[in-house]
Image (cartoon, rainbow, N blue to C red):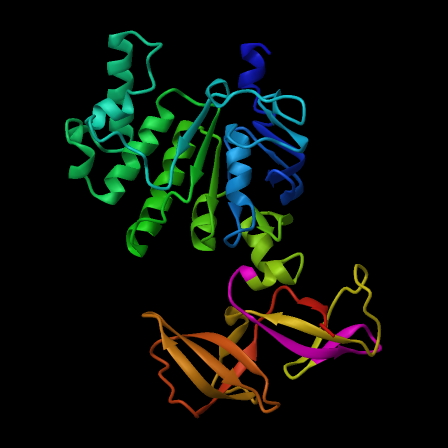
Amino acid sequence: MNRADQRDPNVPALVLEALTLSYRSRSTASCVVQDLSIDVNKGEIISLLGPSGCGKTTVLRAIAGFQPVQSGRIVLMQREVSSSDIHVPPERRKIGMVFQDYALFPHLDVAGNVGFGLHAMTTAEREQRVVELLKLVGMSELAHRSPHQLSGGQQQRVALARALAPRPELLLMDEPFSNLDVELRERLALEVRDLLKQTGTTALIVTHDQHEAFAVADRIAVLAEGRLQQWGTAMDLYHRPANRLVAGFIGEGVMLSGVVDAQGCLLNALGKFPCDLSDTVLKAGDPAEMLVRPDDIQHDDDSPLKARVVSKAFRGAQFLYTLALPTGQHLISLVPSHHDHAIGELIGIRMEIDHVIFFPSVQ
């Protein structure tokens, strides 16, 4: 593969093709991930998102070269690096990694950590690259500090600079913000995205936190039960979840029971909702459930539809209300916090649904 191929923006930076990964003991093999296929564009930031035990870290380890592949293959910049017959060692994959605990070398200062992997450069080239990276991550003034003298956010920036220093073809980040407090986590996630976009770095971030994935990634692969459940943008996952697993994992919401009428509409306690049944097995008379998000339910004092406040959670700018309909079914709604209603109070609500999401009722 020539240098022109590496610069071609139309060449996928990473391809996972029908990937199956297992952990093997002496007598048995336990399948962790089955038939995973995704393509990652050059310069794209993607996230593997899912609950603990879904296989996302195993996928990251396989891409890095630390986990063998049972079937399928991994292709990095048109070069096959993993399959059942091929295994390119980690050090030959041109991959950078940022670990959950940052893994900084305690005996080296900040500059020494950033320049650690630049042995192929001359001393002058290495020093120049370190200066560039420290300036990029805003750590120039702390170049001679030891890792233990840094805050968690500063350590994370140093780890990121060290991973970017050799100009990797792909950057892997394993739960990179999990050791930080919530406020710093959200701010740093946005900073990391800006930095990766500024450098044109292709990156894959593993996380269980949907807010991190939404803040950083261009596209998100939702993994659950060892399989890819959905692959798309944050908007796709939130407004058009492919199945109940994704609907339940992404965002907040409740399933409101109803029935399909003769016109193919969904009838429930909130009204009548046109829906496309072409890709479902539903027919007239079948029970179905509609996903209702908190932002679908708007507070409206003039609405004839009333719901009783069952509980509320103060979130600063908003209250998250749990509301009971006259049928006894519950909804949740985000309401500006200057609307402070008492438990048991009836309030007016109206629907604002742009995407009707429904599934056959679970028997």
Q: How many marks?
A: 0
The percent position of residue 219, horizontal first and vertical second, equals: 55, 43
Above or below residue 281? Residue 266 is below
Which residue does the image show at 79% across and 62% down from the upper left? 280
Image side of residue 360 versus residue 42, left or right: right
Image side of residue 65 versus residue 135, left or right: right
The percent position of residue 291, horizontal first and vertical second, equals: 62, 69
Occupied quadrant, residue 167: top left
Membership of 256 in magenta stretch: yes
Image side of residue 318 versus residue 322, left or right: left
The percent position of residue 218, horizontal first and vertical second, equals: 51, 42
335 or 65, which is in the foreground? 65
Membership of 297 in magenta stretch: no
Quadrant location of the C terminus in the rendered image = bottom right
From this viewpoint, which residue is outermost toward the top? Answer: 122
61 or 239, which is in the foreground? 61
Occupied quadrant, residue 11: top right
Quadrant location of the N terminus in the rendered image = top right
Above or below residue 146? Residue 320 is below
Q: What stretch is highlighted in magenta?
A: 249-267
Which residue does the image show at 45% across and 87% down from the upper left? 309
Which residue does the image show at 37% across and 41% down from the upper left? 100
The percent position of residue 228, horizontal first and vertical second, equals: 64, 47
Above or below residue 359? Residue 90 is above
Taking the image as drawn, is residue 88 in sight? yes
Above or below residue 61? Residue 293 is below
Taking the image as drawn, is residue 47 in sight? no
Which residue does the image show at 84% across and 77% down from the upper left? 262
